[in-house]
Amino acid sequence: MAGLTVRRYGAGQLEEVRPELLRVYAEVYADRLHEEFHSVERFAERLGWSAEVPGFAAAVGHRDGAAVGYAFGCVLQPGTNWWKGLRGPVPGSEVTETGTRTFALSELMVVEAARGTGAAREIHDALLARRGEERVTLLVEREHPRVRARYEGWGYRWFGEIVPFTDAPVYDAMVLPLGR
């Protein structure tokens, strides 16, 4: 996206960008904010949880001084609940986390005006640059097959179906080897 600048942040810098993340989230999910799971309050709670996990990182894309998108995640720790709710048989070795194996991409979103410009990919790549983990995982709502197809085009593969919280929708879990 022309004029896009992307900056990375760690957990200690979260408060600096939290208002921008909440604003972008509210804009992207404007039509679903009435759903408890998609409310700004629940999102803020999930953001806070992510920032408490080792390896938290965020990348925020700005254009003309305003945030147009972001991505954030953390490193899955031993005993993580990330894979809780995974449906179907998956070998235990695939969901055993070491604290250095998997980066969980919790959110990646851009405002409507930035969609189709390459901003999402640029923010994604900036977040994952210099990561030391073996792989990255993310969840895509089953209701968004076009988003899933985009991630598949970026090299992600389907891993399984998952319901991460009791009040969450059904997601497709996806994994991308980082080749490190």
Image (cartoon, rainbow, N blue to C red):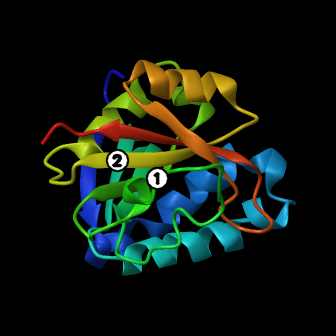
How packed mark 2 is, by other alpha carbons closer than 10 Å (few <14, some 14-19, many 20 or more), is: many
Location of mark 2 (residue): 136
Does residue 87 sit above or below 97 in this rendering? above
Q: Which of 131 and 94 is in front in this view?
A: 94
* Position of 73 relative to 1 (above/below): below
Q: How many marks?
A: 2
What residue occupies the far right of the structure in this picture?
34
Element on which disc 1 rests: loop
User: In this rendering, would 2 be left or right of 40?
Assistant: left
**Going from the N terminus, do you reach mark 1 or mark 2 first?**
1
The quadrant holding residue 97 is: bottom left
Disc 1 residue type? Pro
Q: Is mark 2 on a helix, strand or loop?
A: strand
Mark 1, residue position: 91
Q: Which residue is drawn at 40% across and 53% down?
A: 94
Q: Which amino acid does label 2 sit on?
A: Val
